Image (cartoon, grey):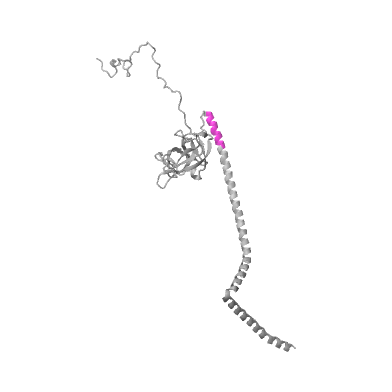
Amino acid sequence: MARRGNRRTGGAGPLIGVAVLTALITAGVTIVVTDQRGGAVAGIASDISGAVGGVLMTPVRWGEGVVASVGSFFGGASLNQKLKDENRALLQWRDQAKAMAERLDAYEKLHGVKAEQLPQGLTGRLISESSGPFAKSGIVNLGAKAGVKVNWIVMNQNGLVGRVIAVGSDTSRVLFLADGDSRVPVMGETTRARAIAMGDKTSAPRLAHLNTPALMRDGERVMTSGDDGIFPRGIAVGQAGVAPDRQWRVRLASSASPIDFVRLVPPSNFPPPLDPVTAPSLAPPPTEGATTTPVQGGVLPLAADAAGIPTAATPEA
């Protein structure tokens, strides 16, 4: 029985092999013929590979999303900590500024110093002017009806912008610091070195009439000195530095952001005295009817005939 079974199994093996080989050949021929006709098999294979690839890439994409989320979380935490540190430093600066302001106020009251406080002023919208008589000027929507006058100071949240040079009923013309006709007395915040910020139609006006040698430092904060009696003292102008043309210039603080809304304040004009002040006399005037006796060796003539009075340098007869 065992021998018969082995013979039957051995005889069926070649038949199965022939059948499998025939099926593979038939499938290969079918694939070649079908692919030559329209590439349907290639399309089906592509679709299958795309679906399989999408399934396989899903965990990868999920992992990338998790990594990005974790990175964003830690980045946000770092930024949050940085903002907290900056806020803490700003609070310290605020407390120091308040303490210094109170101390300065006490000193001014103690010594009777008249404080120069910047008035609140008016807020308006500024637009640039392209067809005006000046190269660098603008128009603000505030005029005489709002109380604006010539020489009013114009500034934004960053610093000085310019001054009013012409006033209409509803608008005013503002001369920018960069214009060629602009002249503003300035000083260094630390060194107190004086200079004149002269506009030359560039974004960084030139600092002229500096001390010789220049006392101003590179990178020093520049503000108005108030020496002309028009611009209030202490308004931020910009940052000093040496330009590529080897000239001292100031990079304007007002240009740090687009100029849109501005504040207009009156100038700090010092009014002249109304009553003239006479110089004190060195000696009381002579009494009416009194005679003046010339002094021997005098220098100044005391009477009409003083030319005949002998002096120490006149030889005696």
Answer above or below: position of 303 versus 201.
above
Q: Give x and y (percent) for residue 152.
A: 48, 35
Query: What residue is at 61 percent from the left and 59 percent from the top?
Result: 65
Count of numbered tags: 0
Which span is picked out in magenta? 98-110
- Depth order, front residue of 112/180: 180
**Which residue is more in the foreground, 58 or 304?**
58
Residue at the left extreme? 317
x and y percentages locating residue 69 in the rendered image: 62, 56
* Residue shown at 57% from the left, 41% from the top: 92
Above or below 280: residue 45: below
**Quick one: quadrant of the C terminus?**
top left
Judge whether 269 appears above or below 46 on screen.
Answer: above
* Residue 106 magenta-highlighted: yes
In this picture, residue 202 sits left or right of residue 34 = left
Q: List the single residue furthest toward the top.
A: 289
To which quarter of the image does residue 86 belong? top right
Residue ranking furthest to the right: 1
> Is 56 left or right of 202, judged from the image as shown?
right
Residue 161 located within the stretch drawn in magenta: no
Q: In which quarter of the image is the N terminus?
A: bottom right
The residue drawn where x is 57% and y is 40% is 94
Task: Inspect this view and state whether residue 118 appears.
Answer: no
Is the magenta region chiefly helix, strand or loop? helix
Residue 294 in the image: x percent, y percent? 33, 14
Q: Is residue 34 visible?
A: yes
Picture quadrant of residue 250:
top left
- Which residue is nearer to you in this view: 280 or 268? 268
